[in-house]
Amino acid sequence: PLCQARVCPLVMQLPLFLLLSACIVCHAGSFSVGKTGSQLQAFAAPGGTRIGSFLTALHNSPALGRPPPLCQADGVGARMRAGGMLSGLSMAAKKKVSKKKLAQQEQAQMGEGGGGPKTSKREEKRALDAMWEEIERVGVGFDCSAEDAKKVNELCRSVEEYMSITNSARSSRLWGKWKLCFTDSPAMLKNKGVTGLGSIPFSGFVELTQTLRSNGTAVTEEVLTVPPFGKESRSFLRGQVLQVAPEVIEQTYVEVSLGGVFNSNSGDVGGEVFFSKAVLAIAYLSEQLRICRTRSDHVFVFEREAYE
C-alpha cells in the first residue's frame, strides 16, 4: 500500500540518519534540517562527499513525502507520456482530416478553382423553380410591371450561377427550336414582339420561337392574332447565327415575311441592311433552358421545344 511505501523506509533509515547527522555536526558544524539536499552537500567537508550525496538522495526519497519524477514511477509516467503523445498525434490527424473534408465541401459548393459555378443540384432546382413560378405569373413580360420584370431578371441571375458549360456558343445544346418565355428588352416591350405588328391595336401576341441550326442558319417565327376576327398571323425572319466569342452569339436576319402579305430581303433594299440584329451572351444553357443577356443586361429566357 502507498502508506507503507512511505512510512516503512523512514523507520528503517531513521537510526542511520541520526548517526550520519551526528557525524556531519561534528565534522562541519550545525545545519538546519529544512535545508535542501544540495545545501547539505555544500556543508559537507571534502572528505565527506559521499555523505552529502547520500543525504541528497535521501532528501529526494519518497520517504520524505516528495514523489519521484514522473518517468521513474515504475514506467507509469512513461506510459502516460507516450499515451499523451499518441493522443496528440491522433488529434492532429483528426484535425487534418477535418480540414481536408471541409476544403472538399467548399470546393464542391464553389466549383473547381474556387471561383467557378455552383454545383449543388438541389439549390439549382430551387432557383429554377422560383424563376419559372414568377415567369408563369407575369407571362412573357410585355404587360408586366417594372418591379415584376426586375424580379424575374434577378431570379434569372440566380439560375445563371449554375452555368457549367464552357464555349457555349459552339455547344450542341444550342441547336434546336426555342420558345420565348420572358424578356425585359425595351425594344421587344415596345413592339410587343420582334416585327412590331404586335403593337397594332386589337392585335395580340401568341408566341415567338427561334430555330438555330448547326449549319449557321437561324429562323425566328412570330405568331400574332390580328383584327378583325383574331385570326392567327405568322411572320418569319431568316438569317444566320455566328459565334463572336466563346459565350456570345450574333443573330442577323436578312429576309422577312410579314403575315404572308409582305416579303422582302436585304438585297431589295441594300446588301448591308439587316431587318433585325441581336448580339446575345449565353448566360445559362441546359437541355431545356437557354438564358441570354444583351449588352445592357436585359434578359431573354427560352425553353426548348425541339432538337435539331
Image (tube, helix red, strand yellow):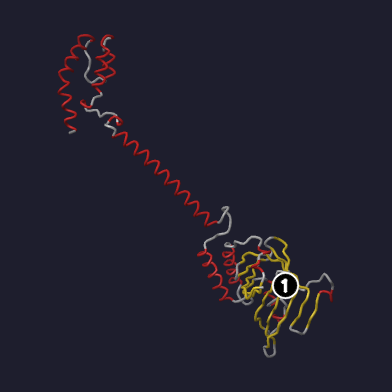
Q: Position of residue 193 (x, y in %)?
A: 69, 77
Going 59% across and 64% down the picture, which residue do you hit?
A: 160
Q: Position of residue 156 (x, y in %)?
A: 59, 67
Tell how many labels. 1
Q: Is residue 241 above or below residue 225?
A: above
Disc 1 residue type?
Answer: Ala
- Which residue in the rendered view is the most extreme toward the bottom? 229
Characterize the local packing of mark 1: few (<14), some (14-19) or many (20 or more) Cα atoms within 10 angstroms. Answer: many
Q: Position of residue 132 (x, y in %)?
A: 56, 72
Going 17% across and 17% down the picture, which residue do you hit?
A: 16
Where residue 19 sits, quadrant-wise, is top left
Q: In the displayed structure, does residue 124 sit left or right of residue 84?
A: right
Residue corresponding to mark 1: 218
Q: Position of residue 124 (x, y in %)?
A: 53, 65
Q: Judging from the image, what secondary structure is the residue with disc 1 in?
A: strand
Closer to the camera in the image, 230 or 123: 123
Q: Quadrant of the C terminus?
A: bottom right
Q: In the displayed structure, does residue 127 sit left or right of residue 10?
A: right
Q: Quadrant of the N terminus?
A: top left
Closer to the camera in the image, 278 or 287: 287
Q: Is residue 49 above or below residue 93?
A: above
Q: Is residue 20 above or below residue 253?
A: above
Where residue 168 sits, quadrant-wise, is bottom right
